[in-house]
Image (cartoon, helix red, strand yellow):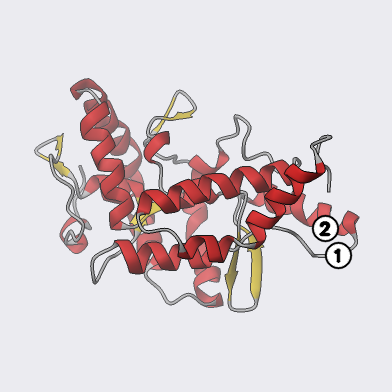
């Protein structure tokens, strides 16, 4: 590893924190706690692996096939941010951005939504490989002037991007865009082993879903959350954690 001349004690502290991520996760009692831990662990990993570009001005994870996903509780925090910090003009512009991407790509968005609901297995991964390219010409509606406009309330997967591994049965991969996955593979080949000090995303996702969401909670991509919260051309004043998604599937906005 390259640590940019950081003190050994600081490096060891970061390594210990990452290695104990599952234990630290058990100490969290709110979604805000989980977010704080995710932020710290992401910072630690990106310090230890400076070849990962996910702390630069890169925003590939906000575009195309990396469309951000949120559970209901995470969406509630985004919605709260919108109602508190987005002006009426900002909200109107947001709805226009959603409309511009959603209407011509509605079927693709719903295919991604349906794939998210599938059982977590390799078949799901293969389905994602088929449907995600259909979003290549889209981007997250919260990306404004190449920056996240809800950064302080962004979902957990956005915070974990580039700094966590995810496991699907026997398949383990860096939770990042294809470019960063390729860079990590090249790094591992040069290193001569596949050993890395990076936490797994899976237990964080499980805790968020099981501890902070209502029974029957459905996660989906942010554009669909927004579509379910547009009423008479405006952002709904309250977050609905269990919307009837099917009622919106056939409608343009």
Q: Which residue is drawn at 90% across and 62% down?
A: 192
Q: Which residue is drawn at 25% across and 41% down?
A: 79
Distance between mark 2 and mark 1 Cα atoms: 6 Å
- 26 or 109, which is in the foreground? 26
Q: Residues within 10 Å of mark 2 (few under 14, many from 20)?
A: some
- 8 or 241, which is in the foreground? 8
Q: Can residue 236 be seen in this view?
A: yes
Left or right, residue 12 beside residue 215: right
Q: Would you say the residues marked 2 and 1 are in contact, meaning their CB atoms lie under 8 Å apart?
A: yes
Q: Residue 193 carries which label?
A: 1
Q: Is residue 66 visible?
A: no
The x and y percentages for residue 234 are 14, 34
Q: Establish if 15 lies above or below 119.
A: above
The x and y percentages for residue 178 are 65, 51
How many dots with numbers?
A: 2
List the residue tagged with mark 2.
188
Q: Establish if 69 lies above or below 231.
A: below
**Could you tell me which secondary element the residue under label 2 belongs to?**
helix
The x and y percentages for residue 56 are 63, 32
Q: Which mark is residue 212?
A: none
Q: Establish if 19 lies above or below 184.
A: below
**Could you tell me which secondary element the residue under label 1 belongs to?**
loop
Left or right, residue 18 beside residue 131: right
- 122 or 56, which is in the foreground? 56
**Which quadrant, please, contains the C terminus?**
top left
Q: How crowded is mark 1: few (under 14 residues within 10 Å), some or many (20 or more)?
A: few
Q: Residue at x 70, y 41 (%)?
A: 47
């Amino acid at each position: 590893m390259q640590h940019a001349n950081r003190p050994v004690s600081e490096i060891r502290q970061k390594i210990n924190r990452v290695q104990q991520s599952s234990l630290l996760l058990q100490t969290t009692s709110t979604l805000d706690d989980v977010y704080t831990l995710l932020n710290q662990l992401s910072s630690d990993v990106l310090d230890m692996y400076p070849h990962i570009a996910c702390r630069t001005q890169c925003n590939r994870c906000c575009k195309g096939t990396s469309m951000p996903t949120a559970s209901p509780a995470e969406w509630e925090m985004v919605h709260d941010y919108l109602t508190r910090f987005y002006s009426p003009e900002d909200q109107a512009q947001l709805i226009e951005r959603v409309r511009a991407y959603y209407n011509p790509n509605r079927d693709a968005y719903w295919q991604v939504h349906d794939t998210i609901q599938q059982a977590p297995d390799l078949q799901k991964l293969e389905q994602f490989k088929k449907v995600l390219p259909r979003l290549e010409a889209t981007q997250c509606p919260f990306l404004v002037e190449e920056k996240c406009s809800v950064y302080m309330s962004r979902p957990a997967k956005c915070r974990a991007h580039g700094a966590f591994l995810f496991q699907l049965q026997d398949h383990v991969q860096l939770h990042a865009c294809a470019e960063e996955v390729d860079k990590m593979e090249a790094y591992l080949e040069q290193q001569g082993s596949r050993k890395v000090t990076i936490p797994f995303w899976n237990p964080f996702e499980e805790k968020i879903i099981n501890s902070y969401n209502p029974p029957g909670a459905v996660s989906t991509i942010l554009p669909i959350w927004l579509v379910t919260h547009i009423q008479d051309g405006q952002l709904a004043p309250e977050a609905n954690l269990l919307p009837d998604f099917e009622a919106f599937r056939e409608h343009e906005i």
